[in-house]
Amino acid sequence: MASETVTFSSALDVTPVAGDWAAVRDGKILGLAGRRTAVERPDPDGNRTQVLAANIDVVLIVVAAVPRPSLRAVERMQVMAWDSGATPVLVVTKADLCADPEELLDYVAPVSAGIEVVLSSIADGRGLDHLRGLIQHGTTTMLGASGAGKTSLLNALDGADAAVAAVRRDGQGRHTTTTRRLFFMWPSGVMLDIPGIRSLSLKATQEGIADTFEDVAGVARNCRFGDCTHDGIAGCAVAAAVAAGEIPARRLESWLAVQRELSFQERRNNPAAMAEQRKQWKQATKMSRKRR
């Protein structure tokens, strides 16, 4: 695999990112091929979209078995993966540290409907051959917090020598990947290693959310109103399913949290909507004070 230092043509209307196919001549990128898929999130300023990786075929959502993974984090990364256009796979690392793997599978089952789940361990080798089969063709990347074992997994899968670091005493990971690098995966695949995600801010569509929350989306079709927000409106089939124990209350809470964040992102990009929201907040505060 060759590498070359290049500059960008001033005529480019899109900034190249890791995973892009580029036309290069005389050390300058002259053009980019159209992107089939793109893993995105909002920039910290909230005014633009940051493309983390392009033309990804498989997204490995990597979480550690110990301590127990955050189900909400799995859901949020799954939204990002589905919305990118790639195929998400949930990989639970450090499975050798888990006393009851079957119980762990039951624990993640509510947030992994419709995607493959692989228990893996670099200590005893479980799951590694299966993962190699999944990523032997096309382009793969990994999403997950630092400390989940992404770099160690990469090293184990194809003998890479990327640097790793011990997890801190509080269980939080240390950032070892600070740049985006491509690794060849035999016989014809590549792994794009990207830095761990510090923030799980979302850039997604309702389609990506529906794919992640299939249980909520399926029941929502029976709601009395087509624009039901599932937050107490009469005739809400989702609320009825939660009350009946058919959908975990935590799933609905996560769905609502994702919807609130997307609404916030939309308002940040729309000054008029943000101003209207602030006006409503002020009115609500005044009414609350009057009641006192």
Image (tube, rainbow, N blue to C red):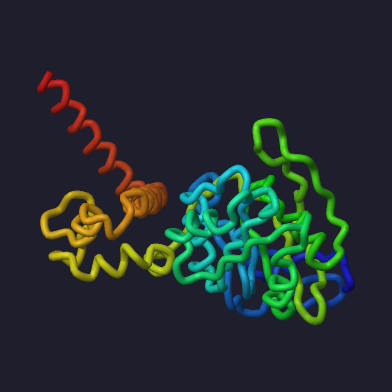
Residue 110 seen in render: yes
Residue at x-position 76% and y-position 77%: 189
Indicate the position of residue 235 as horizontal and vertical percent values: 12, 59
Residue at x-position 27% and y-position 42%: 277
Please tell me whether residue 255 is drawn above or below residue 30 in the rendered image.
Answer: above
Please tell me whether residue 218 is drawn above or below residue 252 in the rendered image.
Answer: below
Indicate the position of residue 42 as horizontal and vertical percent values: 52, 53
Residue at x-position 45% and y-position 59%: 111
- The answer to whether 45 appears left or right of 190 in the picture is left
- The quarter of the picture where residue 169 lies is top right
Residue 229 seen in render: no
Residue farthest top in this picture: 292
Indicate the position of residue 90 as horizontal and vertical percent values: 58, 63
> Foreground: 197 or 262?
197
Please tell me whether residue 288 is drawn above or below residue 186 in the rendered image.
Answer: above
Q: How many marks?
A: 0
- The answer to whether 290 appears left or right of 37 in the picture is left
Residue at x-position 60% and y-position 60%: 61
Split into 4 quadrants, where in the image is the C terminus? top left
Indicate the position of residue 19 as horizontal and vertical percent values: 70, 70
Split into 4 quadrants, where in the image is the N terminus? bottom right
> Foreground: 12 or 122?
122
- The answer to whether 93 appears left or right of 205 in the picture is right
- The answer to whether 125 appears left or right of 85 in the picture is right
Please tell me whether residue 241 is drawn above or below residue 98 in the rendered image.
Answer: below
